[in-house]
Image: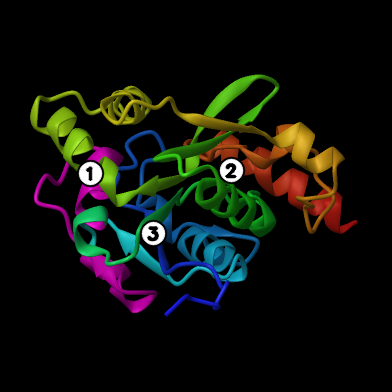
Amino acid sequence: MERTDRSPEPASGFVLAGGLSRRMGREKALIEFGGRPLIVHALEILREAGIPASIAGARSELGAFAPVVHDANSGSGPLAGICAALAATRGQHAIFLSVDLPFVPPSLVAFLFHHARVTCRAITIATVTGFAQTFPAVIARQALPALASELNAGRNGCFAAFDAAAASLGQSVSCVSTELVAQSGHVLHPDGLAPAQWFLNLNTPSEMERAEALRKRRIA
């Protein structure tokens, strides 16, 4: 029987929160931003995009916020969390967001997922001012063997692993220009931030201060 249901195929969302937070000096996921822990912001971005959200990483204390997928290569960086999550999910795609990107609009996550489904590409990410952003990333389960091979070889860099996984499938990484999707109205930021501000990465106390200042300016 021909399928008439055109709803999106099942997908799983994962917040990557297994890092050691060395530059921050304390557990990054639990640091409050705008009165709420960063892990809460990241989970809500995925959920508001219509994606069920879990946490990928080895920090069990985060289990109070969402289900946690633990990785067997704790300390190997986000690529280990990606591989563990892809191995655990049943959906054809998984969407990954790092815990330190509180300004990413949910509509961008939703658009990247839609783009990945339409183009049938294994790896889909965004670009801003021409530069590729590692996260958020939409990754098809078929990319897992190549990603795991990179991880097992000690090559833990996510973007290089994305390139290798796409190439193993005869593809390239699909890059979506945030400026173009913003100008076309396909992606809108709820606080009116420009695309260049969506990817403000919070790795240090000074970056946290900058982000808080930006948030307060938008509220004002």
Q: Position of residue 81 (x, y in %)?
A: 25, 49
Residue at 64% in and 42% down: 209
As helix, strand or loop, the secondary structure at mark 1 comes to: helix
Q: Position of residue 70 (x, y in %)?
A: 18, 60
Residue that badge 3 annotates: 14
Say what amino acid the circle numbered 3 marks. Answer: Phe
Left or right: residue 56 versus residue 107 is left
CA gap between label 3 and label 2 equals: 22 Å
Q: Is residue 78 magenta?
A: yes
Local packing at callout 3 (Cα closer than 10 Å; few below 14, some 14-19, many 20+) is many
Q: Name the mark on residue 208.
A: 2
CA gap between label 1 and label 3 equals: 15 Å
Say what amino acid the circle numbered 2 marks. Answer: Met
Left or right: residue 40 versus residue 220 is left
Q: Name the mark on residue 144.
A: 1
Q: Which residues are magenta?
A: 60-85
Say what amino acid the circle numbered 1 marks. Answer: Leu
